[in-house]
Image (cartoon, rainbow, N blue to C red):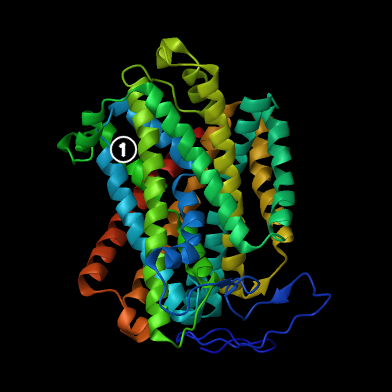
Amino acid sequence: MTASTGAEPIATATGSVNPTIHHRRSAPLIQTANGRSLEEVNASITVPKDKAPFWKNLAAFSGPGALVAVGYMDPGNWITSIGGGAQYGYLLMSVVLISSLIAMMLQYMSAKLGIVTGLDLAQATRLHVGRKPGFVLWICTELAVMATDIAEVIGGAIALKLLFGIPLIVGVALTVLDVLILLLLTHVGFRRIEAIVSALILIIMAVFVYEVVLARPDVPAVFAGFLPNKQILGNGQLTMALGIVGATVMPHNLYLHSSIVQTRDFDRKDDKQVANAVRFATWDSNLQLSAAFVVNCLLLVLGAAMFFGHGDGLDTFTALYNALGDQKVAGPVASGLLSTLFAVALLASGQNSTITGTLTGQIVMEGFIRMRIPIWLRRLVTRIISIIPVLACAIIFGGKESALDSLLVYSQVFLCVALPISMIPLVWFTSSRKIMGKYANARWLAILAWIVVAALTGLNAQLLIQDVGELVALI
């Protein structure tokens, strides 16, 4: 399949790109995008070209993994993880571990695809399925990105209410202003964006480490929870386990990772440099996803240590905020400081997701339909569209958080649909020797990946049926 005419050709499956890129002083708002993924930052970060110490290489390639890890610790995971601990103690620790291992496998494949082929997942999919199917897939993926954005709007508005007492309706409207943050970040360079995201991740982790230490969890029981237990197969436990797994792997991360690993400047024609890039991108991804794993474990441990046995009704962010400051619920360690730190972490998580969600939206638009718009316009349009249902819900239900939390759950329907259409091409491409050459997945890894795809697709189908059924019942 050839690229459309009228602009520089898109990178081919062999990884070659047209090095001649023409920029106009006054570019139109809407442009054709047939070049490299995230053209403005592609190959913008220098990495060692010759033999260099391990730590120097790792430092140069570190960063993309942090942006990806954000999706595995976003506000959408918090209620599920803390609720799982509150209801079933440390039983579901093994589910968090399995979810994280699945995430590491899929993100490894995503990074490898971008490095070896020079295409992000959206570009590769469009190249192999054609324009019309690509347009349909773009619509599905855009809906998933907007569903993720809805979660960010809700989390940000609730955090503003908890920290500053701002009414939810006003807080929802204020989230539009985060476009100003994106405008600022577009001028500081991609390396600094990675640093900002990493710093916010450390803030989130520090908050929950502090709160878990104060909660004094049963450490032997925590480690015992990493061993799968047949009790997980009970009705309530299994439902919660499926919720944890289903909320962990996000489709937009697969597109994001395959693009941002290309920000490193290395020679794709030099096999040693390509192998080095794959190796250290994998190290970066696994280390950062390990941090996300720790955060999710801390969330579950916090729920188990503070609320197990008396944590009914902790199904909203405000309920958790209040519980952390209530000695009758959280015990003698409860304090206003714990509640405030929880809200700060929630706000940090929402801002992190804002950054990565905007980048992903740009990637899928350019990759699937080959159209580019300025990042500030992309953010503004996406956020305005996302706040419409949130604002309507807040107004209709008088600013009740429970209504917004229900909307957050129903918004995940689009994620259930989008996950298979991102996983299936990813495993297909990275298992193909024609596309990946010697970097194709080993047979055992390909088999394992297809099993995971089938399991997660079935899981998401079940969650989809459940969410749609609840929505129909409400109507």
Residue 416 percent location from the top left of the image: 43, 52
Relative depth, front residue between 101 and 169: 101
Q: Is residue 213 visible?
A: yes
Residue 33 percent location from the top left of the image: 65, 77
Relative depth, front residue between 298 and 132: 298
| Residue under the point 44% across and 48% down | 72
Tag 1, which secondary structure?
A: helix
Circle 1 crowding by C-alpha within 10 Å: few under 14, some 14–19, many from 20: some
| Residue under the point 70% across and 62% down | 375
Q: Is residue 402 visible?
A: no
The residue pinned by badge 1 equals 239
Question: Among all residues in the image, which is located at the extreme left?
Answer: 230
Q: Is residue 188 above or below residue 460?
A: below
Question: Among all residues in the image, which is located at the extreme top?
Answer: 328
Residue 361 percent location from the top left of the image: 60, 61
Q: Is residue 407 above or below residue 62?
A: above
Relative depth, front residue between 182 and 5: 182
| Residue under the point 41% across and 63% down | 55
Residue 37 percent location from the top left of the image: 57, 74
| Residue under the point 47% across and 68% down | 258
> Which quarter of the picture shows residue 217?
top left
Badge 1 amino acid: Thr
> Which quarter of the picture shows residue 36?
bottom right
